[in-house]
Amino acid sequence: MYYTGFADEASPDLDIQIKATKELGWKFIETRKIGDSSLAFMDDKAFDDVCRKLSESGVSFNCFGSAVANWAKPITESPESSYDEMRKAIPRMQKLGIKMARIMSFAVTKENRTKDFLDEVVKRLNVIVKMAEDAGIICVHENCMNWGSQNYNNTLRILDRVKSPNFKLVFDTGNPVFSDDVRGNEPYKKQSAWEFYNAVKNHVIYVHIKDGKFKPDSGKADYTFPGEGDGDVKKVLSDLFKRGYNGGISIEPHMAVVFHEADNQDKKEQLRVDNYIEYGRRIMKLVEECKK
């Protein structure tokens, strides 16, 4: 087992990401944002600088937290931007030895969320996963604001149709807390992290740790330290270790900054760094408790 995290929540500056990672005693970062870009889209000079800094620091990227098929890529629009990102990311992932890419299964608008997009999702994911498979990379699908994450049945239906051994799941403990369970008729209840995890756990090879509470009055999320929210973090971790889990534990705090909410990006840098480090320390403590 190893620890990692979305260190861009500490800072978009790679030097600070590396510093925070080393302060925790960790060796890995799940890379998402570096400066104003990402692994796939930065220019060659910036990528060379990334390679140099990682080599000098002893820190590595264990996973590319891509935007492929994510919450900003509607299923009703062309998938080409996701194909393009994967094509551009693969050679850089290979150079850095990154074996996993986080992907999703395309966004669905509220007015379309009861439609069955399975065939279209599978067609697109097969293209993406085939590119990764040919490059020796595993795609891990996240339960986050996409067609497959609307309920665990959708995820299982995708898994039944995308047959590649290079297509697995990353389970995020916090996302179900804030996501509607799109089954039956409205009004939809929020998902249960524990129920979702139990349904898909045989396919989970990687874990994102996020936690929080949904506030019905405001309709907003209140993100918390791990184990203090409704994400069933302790139950999920305990079950994972009981089952012999030996993969990555990746933190995504969302407490000082939420990646996809631009109005939070101006938070003071030190607050972000301090929160990331504190979150990391708390997850290490929680993991030791859950292993007992």
Image (tube, rainbow, N blue to C red):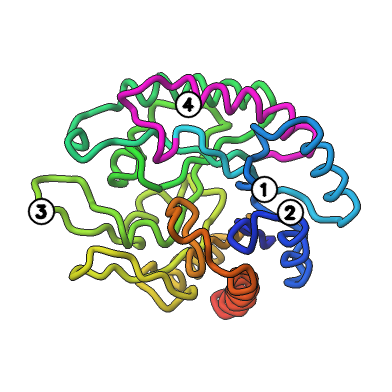
| Percent x, y of residue 196 | 34, 54
Say which residue label 3 marks. Answer: 187
Residue at the (49%, 75%) spot, across then down? 225
Q: Are marks 4 and 3 in contact (CB under 8 Å)?
A: no
Give the spatial CA distance, label 2 vs label 4: 36 Å
Quarter of the figure with the C terminus = bottom right
Element at label 3: loop
10 Å crowding of disc 3: few (<14), some (14-19), many (20+): few
10 Å crowding of disc 2: few (<14), some (14-19), many (20+): many
Mark closer to the chain start, 1 or 3: 1
Give the spatial CA distance, label 4 vs label 3: 34 Å
Q: Magenta stretch: residue 103 in it?
A: no
Say which residue label 2 marks. Answer: 14
Give the spatial CA distance, label 2 vs label 1: 7 Å
Disc nearest the viewer among 1 and 3: 1
Looking at the image, residue 37 sits to the left or right of residue 163; the answer is right
Residue at the (56%, 65%) spot, across then down? 241
Residue in front for this viewpoint, 132 or 222: 222
Amino acid type of the residue that numbered disc 3 sits on in the rendered structure: Pro
Disc nearest the viewer among 2 and 1: 1
Amino acid type of the residue that numbered disc 1 sits on in the rendered structure: Gly
Disc nearest the viewer among 4 and 3: 3
Looking at the image, residue 280 lies above or below residue 31: below
Element at label 2: helix
In terms of image quadrants, where is residue 263? bottom left
Say which residue label 1 marks. Answer: 35
| Percent x, y of residue 54 | 83, 50
Q: Are marks 2 and 1 in contact (CB under 8 Å)?
A: yes
Residue at the (41%, 62%) spot, across then down? 174
Give the magenta part as a residue range: 70-99
